[in-house]
Structures are given as C-alpha cells and as structure tokens.
Amino acid sequence: MTSRSLFQRSCVLLGFIALSIYLFYIGKGHSLLIDTNAVTIDGKELRSPETIEVSIDGKPAESMGRAERILVLVGGPKHSITIEVISGDDRKVEKQFTIPTFMDSAIVSVPAILGDAPSESWITTFTAPPVEEAPAEQMQHEQDTPEATAPVSPDATGGQPKP
C-alpha cells in the first residue's frame, strides 16, 4: 500500500469520525421537565403566575398552573422557550437556552426565567428520588394471607358465634 492511499483512507476515516461526532451532538435527545414550582435564587423567592402557556421550540403551547411539571422531549443542544402569562400581567417572554450534551434529563424553571434570574439558574439536572423498599415482613400478598375472613357456619362452633 502506498503512502498516498494510506493518507487518503486516513482522511476518509477521520472525516467519518468527525461527522459522527457532529451528528451525535446535534441529534442528542433530552427529556425536559418544565417546572412552575417556586424557587429561591440569591435569597429572593420567585413564584410562577397562576396560569401560563409554555411552548418549546415552536411546538403547540401547553397550559400550566402553579406547582406543576410537564415533560417535553427535545433533540439537540439549543432550544427556545416561549412563556405567555395568562393570569395577571399579560406578558410574553421568549428566551433561548442550551442544554449540555450529556445531560439526559433537565428541569427548566419557569419562575427563574420570568423573574429575570441569571441563565445559569434556569436549568438544573433532574435526579429521581431514591426508591424506598418496604421490609420483607411488612409486605403481604393476597395469596399469603390466611382465610380468617371466611364465614363460619354455626354448626362448626356448636351454635355459638365466634368472638
């Protein structure tokens, strides 16, 4: 194999690797939880209005109340959010944000966006709460319980009801 063909094959291979990294970067999917719960940033409590409509990347707007979360699936790192306040001051806020590539699930705080908080506090990583397991002695299954609730005939107890 000549050095020229080796160089050409190496360039094609490096081109495929660069293309696959770029496609991974722009096509990476994320799960966004749009959150309207109150947050405290720099000692200031930010609350969401009673009723808002939220749209991500031009998708149809979804109505939300206070202390709610909705799940939106998106692809790519850059996104836009449009928040329209229905109750209170009728204003419309449009912001751009970027999600880190290796953040699979993120929480987007609507009160932080509406409260003009720094953009670093808009998005946080979602971590699921730990699953609590019940001790084995507390777990009872229907087929394991004794037949204590079955009716007893008067003949089996000698005509006396069982206490």
Image: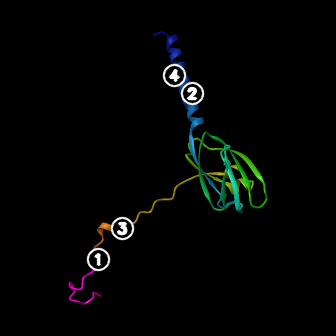
In terms of secondary structure, where does tag 3 sit?
loop
Question: Alpha-carbon neighbours of circle 4 within 10 Å: few (<14), some, or many (≥20)?
Answer: few
The residue singled out by tag 2 in the image is 19
For the N terminus, the quadrant is: top left
Q: In the picture, residue 157 is in which quadrant?
A: bottom left
Q: Return the x and y of residue 32 as percentages of the image width and height.
A: 60, 49
Boundaries of the magenta span: 148-162
Q: Tell us which disc is closer to us: 2 or 3.
A: 3
In terms of secondary structure, where does tag 4 sit?
helix
Alpha carbon distance from label 3 to label 1? 22 Å
The amino acid marked with disc number 3 is Met
User: Which circle's residue, 4 or 1, is located before the other in the chain?
Assistant: 4
Disc marking residue 32: none
Q: Return the x and y of residue 113 as percentages of the image width and height.
A: 71, 53
The amino acid marked with disc number 2 is Leu
Alpha carbon distance from label 1 to label 2? 70 Å
The amino acid marked with disc number 1 is Ala
Q: Return the x and y of residue 149 as percentages of the image width and height.
A: 31, 77
On whether residue 34 falls in the magenta region, the answer is no
Q: Tell us which disc is closer to us: 4 or 2.
A: 2
Q: Is residue 19 visible?
A: yes
The amino acid marked with disc number 4 is Leu
The residue singled out by tag 3 in the image is 139
The residue depicted at 74 percent of the width and 47 percent of the height is 94
Q: Return the x and y of residue 93 as percentages of the image width and height.
A: 75, 50
Alpha carbon distance from label 4 to label 2? 10 Å
